[in-house]
Image (tube, grey):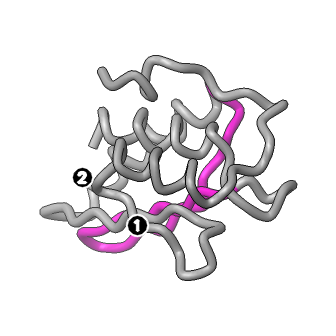
């Protein structure tokens, strides 16, 4: 378990500055930063639809427990995950915590 994955999402997080985003991005190397710096994304390929759906269910359980929800897209053999804190129109530490937690089930 990474140090980020062992933490809990907080609703009192504030929007992160660019330097902190770059630092935390190194801890979730499978994720990409959007060009405007407001969203983390990860595209994951699977052998079939059922495998993608099972991953979606696991991620959904984590999101509910943490009360920090991603945008999810699913199709045959893939899952597309996007994280941002909509209320702040940007990234918070909770987005990176969520990404690290999702990495553990992916």
* Residue 53 circle label: none
Mark 2 neighbour density, 10 Å: few (under 14) some (14–19) many (20 or more): some
Where does the image place residue 89, in percent across and percent down from the top left?
A: 80, 64
Q: Which residues are magenta?
A: 66-84
- Look at mark 1 in the image and give the residue it sits on: 32
Q: To which quarter of the image does residue 104 belong?
A: top left
Q: Is residue 81 magenta?
A: yes
State the residue in front, 10 or 102.
10
Instruction: Determine the residue located farthest toward the bottom in the rendered image.
Output: 35
Q: CA distance from mark 1 to mark 2?
A: 22 Å
Describe residue 87's horizontal placement relative to residue 74 as left or right: right
Q: Secondary structure at mark 1?
A: strand
Where does the image place residue 1, in percent across and percent down from the top left?
A: 30, 21
Where does the image place residue 57, in percent across and percent down from the top left?
A: 45, 42
Where does the image place residue 55, in percent across and percent down from the top left?
A: 34, 46
Dividing the image into 4 quarters, which one contains the C terminus?
Answer: top left
Residue placed at 53% from the left, 32% from the top?
61
Residue placed at 36% from the left, 53% from the top?
53
State the residue in front, 52 or 63.
63
Mark 1 neighbour density, 10 Å: few (under 14) some (14–19) many (20 or more): some
Q: To which quarter of the image does residue 90 belong?
A: bottom right
Describe residue 71's horizontal placement relative to residue 88 as left or right: left
Residue placed at 79% from the left, 59% from the top?
86
Report if the CB atoms under discs 1 and 2 are less than 8 Å apart: no
Q: Is residue 28 magenta?
A: no
- Look at mark 2 in the image and give the residue it sits on: 51
Residue placed at 37% from the left, 73% from the top?
75
Front position among marks 1 and 2: 1
């Amino acid at each position: 378990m990474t140090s980020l994955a062992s933490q809990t999402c907080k609703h009192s997080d504030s929007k992160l500055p660019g330097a902190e985003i770059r630092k935390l991005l190194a801890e979730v190397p499978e994720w990409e930063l959007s060009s405007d710096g407001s969203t983390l994304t990860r595209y994951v390929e699977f052998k079939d639809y059922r495998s993608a759906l099972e991953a979606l269910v696991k991620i959904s359980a984590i999101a509910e427990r943490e009360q920090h929800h991603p945008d999810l897209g699913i199709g045959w053999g893939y899952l597309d995950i996007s994280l941002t804190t909509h209320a702040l129109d940007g990234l918070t530490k909770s987005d990176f915590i969520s990404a690290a937690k999702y990495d553990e089930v992916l």
